[in-house]
Structures are given as C-alpha cells and as structure tokens.
Amino acid sequence: MRFNRNLLLIGLASVVGFSGCSRFLNEDRRKDQVIELSDEKFRCLEDWPAVIRDFTEGNAAERQIRPAFRCLSNALTYFQENTKGSMPEAYTEKDLRDFFGRYFLKQTNIPPALAQGFLRLKQVLFGGSDQFVTKSELIRVVGFLQPLEDQAVLLAPYVRVYTTQEMTAVDAQRIDVAIHQLRSSLQNLMHQVELVRSDYNFDEAQDFLSLLADFVRGASAPVDTFDLISEWLPVIQSVKQVFFGDRASLRGTREWTEALNTVIDLYDLGLRYHYIMSAGLFDTPERMTTALKSGDKLLSLLENSHQMRSTGRLPFRYLDEVIDQVLVRKLINQPLSANTIKGLYRKVVIGMMDPVRRGDTRGADAIEQVHLVSIRREFNIFRLNQVFFDSLGERPVGHRTLQVEARRFDAKAAIRKLVKDPIEEEALLAAWTKFRSLVTKDRPAVFDTGGRVQVQGDVSTLTWVWKARARFNVMHLLTRGFMLGYGDSGDPSTAHCNEQSLIRWYADFTDFGAELKAFDPRAENSGARSFREASFFTFSGDGNDRVNMDEMFEFISLLFSAGLENANTLREHMDDPTTDAYSLGYSGVVCKTDRPDVFGLPMLNEVCFKNELRRTFGKAFVNLPGLVTYVKGLNDAQWDEFYLHLMAAAKSSYSLADLVDTSDLRTAVMILHYMEVLFTTYDANVDAILSREELLAAAPRFIPFLRELSPVKSDKFVTEAFLDLVYKGERPGAWSMTQHGAGRLWGWVSGSSGSTADRLNILRVFGNLKAELEAGTVSTP
C-alpha cells in the first residue's frame, strides 16, 4: 500500500511538469508568452519535491500539504484551459515530452518510457487510452486532487508507523488506529477512480519508478523514497502471486474492494510482526494475543484468497518466491537457508497436515484446501488451550490449583466460540481431553520463567507462571505436529511412534538441525538414540518399543529445556570474558581455546570447564533444585568422581582429550536432566535416596533393554541385573547376580533394609549403558 499511496502522489505531482508551461504547445511562442518556473502561478511547484520528501518521512504537516495541492490543482487547471495538443482536445506522449523540454527542463529531457509510464498510470486510474490524455481526463485529475489532499492530511500522522520508521513504542491499539485510517483513506480514493485495468503489473510499476527515480535524481531531487519503493516491489509481487495468482482478473467494485482489504490486512500483519512479535511470539500476553489474532487473520486470508477460491490451490512456487524475497532482504533474523525452509514447510504440509499422503511428497506442488483445514484445526486447538490458560489470569498458579481449574473448565462453551462445525467441535473436544490429562498429571513438565522444565521431587510446590503456561502450549503444538507426521494413526492423542519413526524424523530434519547447529554433523542418524531417550528418561517413560504422546511431549519439552535454555546458559557463561579472567586467577588457565569445534565455537579447556561447572552449577541448573543441593554437598573427591562419570557418558568418539566441545556440553546437560527425571520420579518419599523398593519400581522401564544384556532372560533375573547395575555401576554377569541375590537373602535374614542408591549410582548407569551401546552388545545403534 505504500506503493499505491506514494505512486499517486508522485505521479500527480510530476504531471505538473506536463501542464504548467504549455500554453502554446503547438504555436510559435513569442517572447512575452514564455512561461518560466519563476512565474507566480508555478513558483509553488518548486516546493513539491520537499513536500513528497517530508510526507514519506512522516514530517509533513497540514499547513504544508494543503497549499501544495492547491498549487498543483491551479497549475493543472491552467494547463487544461490554455493549451492545445497535436490531437483535438488531447495530448500525446510526444506533446508532453516536447513541451516539458521546451519550457521546464532546459538541460534534461523526459525519457519516452517515463512519459508512457505516466499515461499507463492515468489509464489505470481514470480509463481512456494509454497513448494520450484528453482535456476531460485532466478535469477528472483536478477533481481527484481534493479527496487526495484530504486523505493525505489524514494519513500524515501515521506515515512513520506505515514505513516502520517510528522510533517510539507502537502497540496494538496504535496499529489499529493507523490501519483503520489507511483502509478508510484508500477505500475513499478507490471510489474516486475507475481502476478499469487489472493487468497493471508489478514489472511495469518497478520499471516506471526506476525511470522516475533516475529522472528526478538528475534534477537533484530526493530519491530515497523512489528507490525504497522500487526495492520492495519484488516482495509485494511475490506476496501478490500467493493470494491473487499470476494474472488475477478483478472485476467490479466488490472484487477490487476485497483485493484492497486483503492487501491492507497483509500490511497490518507485517506491521504487527515488526512492532510487536519480532521480539518474541509468545513471551508476553500482548504478544500472544497479537500472534493469535494475526494467525487467525492470515489463515482467513489464505482460505478466502482469490487464488484459493478460483483454483483451490496455493502453488509452492509462489510461496518459494516469498521465502526468497524475505531472506534476501533479511526481514526475519534466522540462520536457515532458503532451500532448507522450503523443504521444511513442504514436510510440515505434506508430512503432518495431509491425512492421505502421510509424508509422500511425490507430485505434491501446492497447498490445498485439505491442508488448510488441518492447519486451521491445529491452530484452533492451540487457541482453545490458550483460552484456558488465559482464564487463569497473568498471576502464578500452583499446580494443585491448576488441576482443579482444568477439570472444571467449560471446554464446550469455549469451543463453540471458535468453531461452528460439529465435526470440528468433536475434534477440538477430544484434543482438549488429552491436553487436560497432560496438564493435570501428578508429575507434569512444568516450565519456569526461563523456559526450563522444573524437575523436582516435591511437585506440590510447582508453580505455573504465565510464560510457563505459554511454553507448555507451544510444546503441545509441536508434539501434536510430530505425532501427526510420524505416529501410527491420524489422531495424535492415541498415536504411537516406534524407533523407525524417529529415524525417519531425524533424516527428514537433518538439514534443518544442522543449520540451526542443533544436530552434530559428525554423528550418524541419532533417531534410534532419541527413541531410547524418550522411552527411558521421561516422566512417563516405560521402556517399551513404542513412544506415546505423553512420552514424546516430555521428550520434546526436555530437549527445548536442556538442549536450548540450560545448555545455552552454560555455554554463554563459558564464553564470557570475565569467566576466563576468573579462571586464570583461580586455576591458571582460561576456558576458551583457539581451536574451534564443529559448530564454530571455541573448544573449552576441560580444567576450566570442570571448575566453572561446579562453581556455577546452582545458577545453570536452577530448575533442578534437588541436584543442585546434592552437588553442593559433594567434597572434592566426590565431585571428581561425579564429573568423571558425567563426562564418560557425555563424550563421544569425536571428543578430544582435555577439551570440551559444544556437543559434549549439550550431552552432559541432557544427561543431568535425564538423571534427575529418573531420580525424582522414583524417589517417592523425597529423601534424596532410592531404596530397594523404589529401584524395583523403576526396573520395569529398563527390562526390555537389560534383557539383551542379561545372560538369563527371565524378568526376575533381569530385575536383579538392573539392581546390580545401579549398585555397582558395571554390567552384571551371572556370578555378580548370584552374589547380589545372596546379599539380598542375608538382608532378609538379618532384617536389614538392603542397598540404597543416590544420584551418583544413577549417573554410573548412563556411562555403562552408553558403553554397551557403543560395544554393540545391544542392537540399538
């Protein structure tokens, strides 16, 4: 819309050059008939470049705008009444150029292509021919100037908002007012013109503005606005293709009005992203509200677009062009390449939102109605969940209180406000039932204000802050998408994933993960490992050969918590120059080395890393309060052993001696989370010790895996193997299991309570299991 607004102003202002001095266009001019720019009738036209500049910069006031328009109106009226062209009652492109050169521009001739561009623009707005302009058409132009002047005055206070140059805070209400005025002004102006040609394409507009910019540049006029408009035209063109197609044919006022509203709505979304959402989509209630309203509007625009209504398809090639334009201009700060983003949205649309194809992309070349229906459903499920969370207000809510509120939430009433289709109502209610079960679990994945999952023994003290609830909803959205794409049924609530599902997921998202520097490019497909982690080390893990939605939700939550928030916090601390300074004084070494790791970050000196990990453990792992307390109570020798077993499990075959790279750090952080999940899940009496009975409760989730390690395959002996593994931290053999059994028997005879385990025992298990996997003792790669 900036293009249309400025084009009208620029075009009409420039027409002055064709009108002001051509009183005797086809007559010999006498000396006393020469009209120069210095004439009082036209002196005010010299102010137009400054008016255009000030208006586009948001600095034009009404007292500047109205005199400029009056001057232009008088000049055009004078031109129409006192000149003759080479055609009866009309002026050709050559007439205009000849006159311009004779009376206005003594040193610069107007290019033929630019003059032709003005005539084309005149044709679009007022009809007639693109080869000449008639006197009656000039009268219409003069009549158009008054409403244009009025609307320019009304728009002027918001120009800096429109051009994203406003430096003061812009909230949703201010954007509402600005967009309302833009819509009102442009609709008013649209009713003043005919818009008889809908084939005025963006290539023509771009060429026209480029010629105009070159022309006025030669006249020492400001051209930043022209260049900016010309630069943005390819972006507008690409968006236009998505919603209107290549050659949209708009007929009648209704279709033009719909098209104008679509463009303004898209502009509205762009402004809201720039001013509100670019700093974070879900960080505050205002941003969440803006994101939900914007998402709803965008989906509605796509569902009701001219392209979708006329063809039923939104071709991928159009979306690809938008992506190319957005990335070339760096409109969104993100590290992904265009090819990766294009592949990603295809996988989401075809893999997760197409119930028939189920990931088969062969022959798929467009978003179709079925995909929009699926996307709309998932969006509505997210909105429904957020309605519940927002009903709690912005205050922190205890977990017990939230459980009560979730059970009495009137989901049916909320759903009826979102959808009217009975089938969709049923689908949303089923999704809410599953979501409620996740929220009300006795041990849920609750986030803290820093986006980290709180893993603690006493869940009665868990508190849901607003950001935690928003993060929970986002994780639920991601989990549903995953289960739709890789689960064994179309209902995420009841679907399961197997090991091959995770392997396929990893293969599909390898490029995405590598460019985000989330996947280690040296490692092979780690889908099988992820499957084991989701099955073993989540609150709901059961160790079987399938992962359900609960396990996947907790796994994804832990990945975002540990792999992003905790790991990044620790990494940033290690990269802080003050950390190097402290470590140099404390241990004689700095943390960062000159050797980069596979992600381009400095490898860390392990002496420094070990010391800093211990020194800042409480800050880095504030979401693991029980583990923080445990580590704080370790003496030097105990810390050395703890660290030894942690890094034995964290380091890979790619790791280097005496150095810690980013992959080592991330894996260590994940292991600490997994260990704490296991420990707090089974430490029923929250005494920081796992009794034999508590260990026996944990054994079933590991039985399928340990059966492959045990020389005896019965569950009884495998359970004993698990206890032996925990107590001794090494693979159990037949003799050690016999010894363990004898020890148990003596415990019963003597009345002792048997062995216990602390966090170090659990940590040893990770190292042992890793060794078995790497040795190929079990089948999982």
Image (cartoon, grey):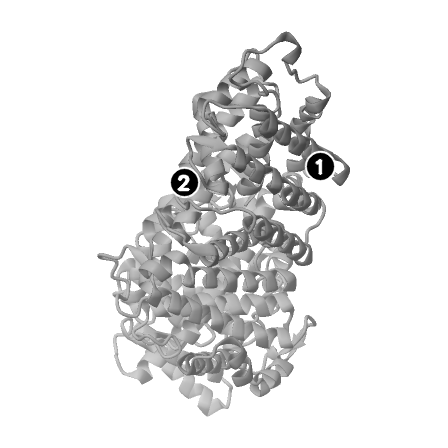
Vertical arrangement, residue 144 with respect to residue 622, above or below: above
Residue 314: image tag: none
Across and down, in percent, residue 131 comes to: 41, 30
Return the residue at label 1: 65
Vertical arrangement, residue 486 with respect to residue 114, above or below: below
Return the residue at label 2: 201
Quarter of the image holding residue 354? bottom left
| Residue at x 42% of width, y 36% of height | 129
How far is the residue under mark 1 from the one under mark 2?
A: 30 Å
Residue neighbourhood size for the residue with mark 1, other residues' Cα within 10 Å, grouped as few (<14), some (14–19), many (≥20): many
Quarter of the image holding residue 724? bottom left
Across and down, in percent, residue 673 comes to: 51, 64
- Residue type at mark 2? Asn
| Residue at x 64% of width, y 16% of height | 35
Residue neighbourhood size for the residue with mark 2, other residues' Cα within 10 Å, grouped as few (<14), some (14–19), many (≥20): few
Is residue 317 or residue 638 the one in the foreground?
A: 317
Quarter of the picture holding the N terminus? top right
Vertical arrangement, residue 197 with respect to residue 490, above or below: above
Residue at the left extreme, as displayed: 362
- Residue type at mark 1? Ile
| Residue at x 33% of width, y 52% of height | 316
